[in-house]
Amino acid sequence: MQTKYLALPGPTSVDNEVLKEMASEVFNHRGKEFSKILANLTAKTQQFLNTKNELHYLTASGTGAMECAIVNSFSKGDKVLALINGAFGQRYADIAKSYGLDVIEFYGKWGQSFDYDKLKETVENINDLAGITVIQGETSTGVVNDLKKISEIKNDKTLLIVDGISSIGAENIDIDGWGIDVVITGSQKVLALPPGLAIICLSKKALEAYRQSDLPKYYWDIGKYKKFTEIGQTPYTPAISLIKAAEKQIEKIANQGMDSEVKRHETIANMVREGIKALGLELFNEKGCRSNVVTPIKPPEGIKVSQIRKLMLDKYKVEVAGGQGKLKESVFRIGHLGNVDPLFVISVLTALEMSLIELGHNVKLGTAVTAAQKALCNSK
Ligand SMILES: *Cc1c(COP(=O)(O)O)cnc(C)c1O
């Protein structure tokens, strides 16, 4: 039985079958068994992501992979345009600045997509732009940025560095077709694994940039990962138990296929949004760029985010997230990614609706659930 409903934008709940893999005996990461697992895991991940680009598993949280992407792609003084319409966009800019890159910040409004015409003009006016950093699914605001458009705006010499930590597997992405040079993701979000692993995927162009790159790096030096891959290993001791669990989980979703996983998340997200709107609440993310994985919601007049979260957790064991950064008190966020299914959504909406009623919001019992059920029926 589930002890808690994790309705967070990560970490997400993990299948029991996958958890069991973590409990098996620890084994040698310099032995044959590990090599076999790593090779299979890497191939299955490439299959799932539909890419021929080089791919490495890193023992790190998602932010580690962000740093890995930066230090391997650029050289001192390189000009990098950081697209920022939320907290994670800012994090990429901050990491790049901390390595002495010449970071130009391009802002969008939180909760909205970028002004792509303005972006085009900006890009055209920068000489020698080495790279663009962008978050595909901005978890802080529930906005999906349009990677295809951005890839059409940038020129051939500019590397496109994407954070797909909370979006890979739930939003459409064509890594090879759109020419995405570096894309990273983390284990604890859509991939429905425990935290602790990250993936980095690099194009030929990114690897050429790596060869020129003079930024300081040791643990993150991708050349070492490349070299060790040839002998079926990682340069340093990996999170062996997580790798074993990942093999099981990635095999499962690779068999489903990316398209079907995206569709599943789309249906679930739609249920959540329709339920929320029926309750008379306002979504923070604008129509047309709404995320399949997280829904940010403004609380009703007179009710605080902290009250909603506390009641949902204490009384119904449902954990939703608060706002991030400057949105801390002004939105709460429901995460609906990974191993989520329609009945999970129904449970979360029930808990929300009953909590809101107890806090004085005037709606009829069953309002959100009915709307979500309708959304599900209509999606078939
Ligand atoms: C969660 C998240 C991160 C940070 O990941 P950590 O694993 O906490 O380091 C970065 N970017 C995005 C878009 C995220 O959703």
Image (cartoon, grey):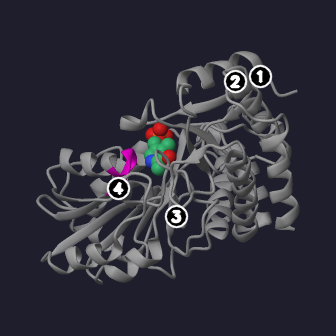
Alpha carbons under labels 4 and 1: distance apart: 34 Å
Question: Which three-letter amino acid code belongs to the residue tagged 1?
Answer: Tyr
Q: Quadrant of residue 20?
A: top right
Is residue 28 in sight in this rendering?
A: no
- Circle 4 — which element? loop
Region of the chain picked out in magenta, as a range: 84-89
**Residue topped by disc 1:** 316
Question: Which three-letter amino acid code belongs to the residue tagged 3?
Answer: Cys
Q: Earlier in the sequence, mark 4 or mark 3?
A: 4
**Residue topped by disc 2:** 312
In the rendered structure, find residue 109 and report the number of the disc placed on it: 4
In the rendered structure, find residue 289 and report the number of the disc placed on it: 3
Question: Which three-letter amino acid code belongs to the residue tagged 4?
Answer: Lys
Alpha carbons under labels 2 and 3: distance apart: 28 Å
Where the N terminus falls, by quadrant? Answer: top right
Question: Which three-letter amino acid code belongs to the residue tagged 2?
Answer: Met
Q: Earlier in the sequence, mark 2 or mark 3?
A: 3
Alpha carbons under labels 4 and 3: distance apart: 12 Å
Residue appearing at x 84%, y 34% in the figure: 365
Task: Note whether 234 is above or below 16 in the view shown.
Answer: below
Q: Is residue 95 magenta?
A: no
In the rendered structure, find residue 143 and report the number of the disc placed on it: none
Which residue is at the front of the view, 245 or 377?
A: 377
Residue 2 falls left or right of residue 156: right
Residue 365 falls left or right of residue 226: right
Q: Quadrant of residue 310?
A: top right
Q: Are marks 4 and 1 in contact (CB under 8 Å)?
A: no
Q: Report x, y in % for residue 77.
A: 11, 60
Q: Is residue 87 magenta?
A: yes
Q: Are marks 2 and 1 in contact (CB under 8 Å)?
A: yes
Alpha carbons under labels 3 and 1: distance apart: 31 Å
Is residue 347 in sight in this rendering?
A: yes
